[in-house]
Image (cartoon, rainbow, N blue to C red):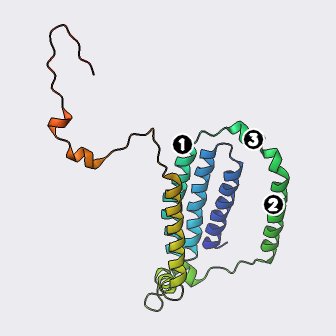
């Protein structure tokens, strides 16, 4: 077996195994850690395809931001594991049907797929000087043919960000907030009260 084929099968096996562990793990923190492992190996598969930009995006964005955010949220939440396990029987039939459909699709795809073998382009990437790198080609494609679609996706994300801020930013009366203007305008005269205390008498605060 070729080295590239061996690496591909190894990474694919780890991705499938870690993906299954994400679902089967009883601890949500362990599920997030298995998810991070799946992301790393998926980045390795992108490197085999010569798409180093997508591999770096997978590591930087998904592992460095999304998965870490999931990990922090799961660790901060007070999850009742008993209630999670009690609702499993309710959704078990639907889950089994979904597993059967995905298994049939996977078997059909494996039966129709044949390995093409290693190529020079997969092994060494594009020849320097004859073709742009995939990062340059992807950037040229996004900012020319799909410039409006890319801008629209940015506007959708901006709208979602503003909506999340509006939904979570609520005015609460029982919270003492910091007023920078009042703090900057304070002087020793209106911030400090000098009280002469007589011997044997207390101070009323």
Q: Nearer the viewer, mark 2 or mark 1?
A: 1
Q: Which residue is mark 2?
A: 98
The quarter of the displayed image where residue 18 is located: bottom right
Label 1 SS: helix
Compare marks 2 and 3 and give the one earlier in the sequence.
3
CA separation in Å, label 2 and label 1: 31 Å
Label 3 SS: helix
- Residue lying at 77% horizontally and 40% vertically, measured from the top left: 86
Q: Which residue is mark 3?
A: 85
Coordinates of residue 159 in the picture (x, y in percent): 52, 67
Q: Is residue 104 above or below residue 92?
A: below
Callout 1: 10 Å neighbours few (<14), some, many (20+)?
few
Residues at marks 2 and 3 touching, judged by CB atoms closer than 8 Å: no
Coordinates of residue 129 in the picture (x, y in percent): 43, 90
Coordinates of residue 134 in the picture (x, y in percent): 50, 81
Q: Which residue is mark 1?
A: 76
In the figure, is residue 97 to the left or right of 170? right
- Residue lying at 65% horizontally and 59% vertically, measured from the top left: 14
- Residue lying at 69% horizontally and 81% vertically, measured from the top left: 116
- Residue lying at 58% horizontally and 50% vertically, measured from the top left: 33
In the figure, is residue 172 to the left or right of 116? left
Compare marks 1 and 3 and give the one earlier in the sequence.
1
Q: Which part of the image, by quadrant, shows the N terminus?
A: bottom right
């Amino acid at each position: 077996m070729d080295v590239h084929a061996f690496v591909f099968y190894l990474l694919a096996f780890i991705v499938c195994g870690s993906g299954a562990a994400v679902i089967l793990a009883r601890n949500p923190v362990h599920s997030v850690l298995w998810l991070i492992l799946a992301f790393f190996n998926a980045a390795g598969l992108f490197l085999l395809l010569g798409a180093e930009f997508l591999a770096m995006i997978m590591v930087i964005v998904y592992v460095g931001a999304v998965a870490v955010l999931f990990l922090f949220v799961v660790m901060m939440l007070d999850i009742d594991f008993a209630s999670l396990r009690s609702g499993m029987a309710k959704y078990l039939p639907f889950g089994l049907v979904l597993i059967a459909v995905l298994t049939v699709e996977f078997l059909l795809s494996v039966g129709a797929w044949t390995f093409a073998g290693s190529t020079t382009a997969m092994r060494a990437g594009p020849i320097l000087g004859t073709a742009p790198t995939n990062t340059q080609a992807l950037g040229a494609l996004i900012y020319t043919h799909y410039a409006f679609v890319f801008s629209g996706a940015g506007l959708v994300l901006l709208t979602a960000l503003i909506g999340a801020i509006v939904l979570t930013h609520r005015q609460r009366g029982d919270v003492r907030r910091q007023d920078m203007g009042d703090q900057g305008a304070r002087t020793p005269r209106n911030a400090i009260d000098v009280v002469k205390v007589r011997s044997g008498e207390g101070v009323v605060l």
